Image (cartoon, grey):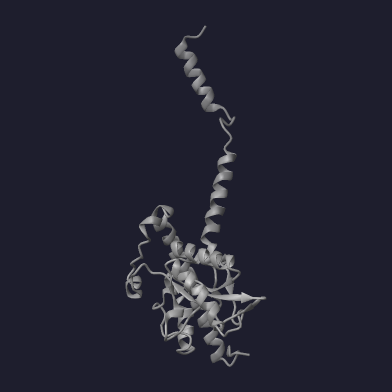
Amino acid sequence: MKPAVAQDAEAYLNALLSTEAVFDTTAFVALEAESEVTMAEREDVWKAWQTVENFTYGKDRGSLPMIADLNSLHPYFRDRIAELIEVCKAQGIELAVVESYRTHAKQAEYFGMGRKYTRSKGGNSKHQYGLAVDVVPVIDGKAVWENHALWRKIGVNGERLGLRWGGRWRAPYDPAHFEWSGGITTTQLAKGMLPAIPRSKSSLYPCLEEEIKKLQEYWEAWETEQAVMASSAKTVVRSGGATGQKP
């Protein structure tokens, strides 16, 4: 019989020389591949955001598509708008999201269309920070823009949720617009400040900073996308192609 030490040494050498897998490594390869796919999908989330084309709701909103996805909004504000939609639905009012996050390029397009669209240049609207949204009531599949009594019901519902309603403004009167900024100004937002959510709701957003950081990456991707689109549209106009005028 070999001494115990010799037996241990021989067993150790055999283990080193063995070609048999000690455990199944394919599972790790599969997990790694799945992780890469998941990361790629996450990076492209912004591409799946719902968009709306010009005249979808019966109004000239410019040639660049509008982002109309609640997932593009600040998480706290997103949930308030989702709540507004549900409250209105319970009252028999169907709300459609016309525009949520708005790029600087899109804001610049509106500014170029005249004061009836906006008085704010790119970067001066809360839309550019995921803190504003435009909605419209829909009746029998048609957007209803001029029913002031209906707008008032919608506006009051939004104000009860702590939102600022554009229907209170005189110039411009903008009943489709709702925003929330936690009391900070657009200038402060442009400097990188973020609104503080109410303490009573803070526990519902434990990963708020991470969510906003990811959102900002998606916003930047959209900024690049629409800046290229806007540049291409200008090139077409200069070369004598389509003008993008209202049909």
Q: Residue furthest right?
A: 140
Relative image position of residue 36 (x, y in whole percent): 54, 52
Q: In x, y percent, where is residue 103?
A: 47, 75
Q: Considering only vertical position in the picture, is 238 above or below 13?
A: below
Name which quarter of the figure residue 60 lies in.
bottom right
Left or right, residue 94 beside residue 160? right
- Residue 101 appears in the picture as rendered: no
Identified at 48% across, 17% down, the residue is 8
The residue lying toward the viewer, choosing from 30 and 191, is: 191
**84 versus 169 height, above or below:** above
Pinpoint residue 200: horizontal percent, then vertical percent: 38, 56
Residue 210 occupies which quadrant of the picture? bottom left
Mark count:
0
**Along the viewing direction, whichever of 38 and 169 lies nearer the viewer:** 169
Q: Quadrant of the C terminus?
A: bottom right
Horizontally, residue 207 falls left or right of residue 32, namely: left
The residue lying furthest to the bottom in this view is 240
Q: Is residue 21 above or below residue 149?
A: above
Pick whichever, 220 or 103, lies toward us.
Answer: 103
Residue 170, image quadrant: bottom left
Residue at horizontal 61 percent and vertical 69 percent from the top: 92
Residue furthest to the top in view is: 1
Query: x%, y% of residue 58?
Result: 61, 83
Q: For the point 67% across and 76% down, which residue is it?
A: 140
- Asked whether residue 196 is in view, the answer is yes
Residue in the picture at 47% in, 66% down: 73
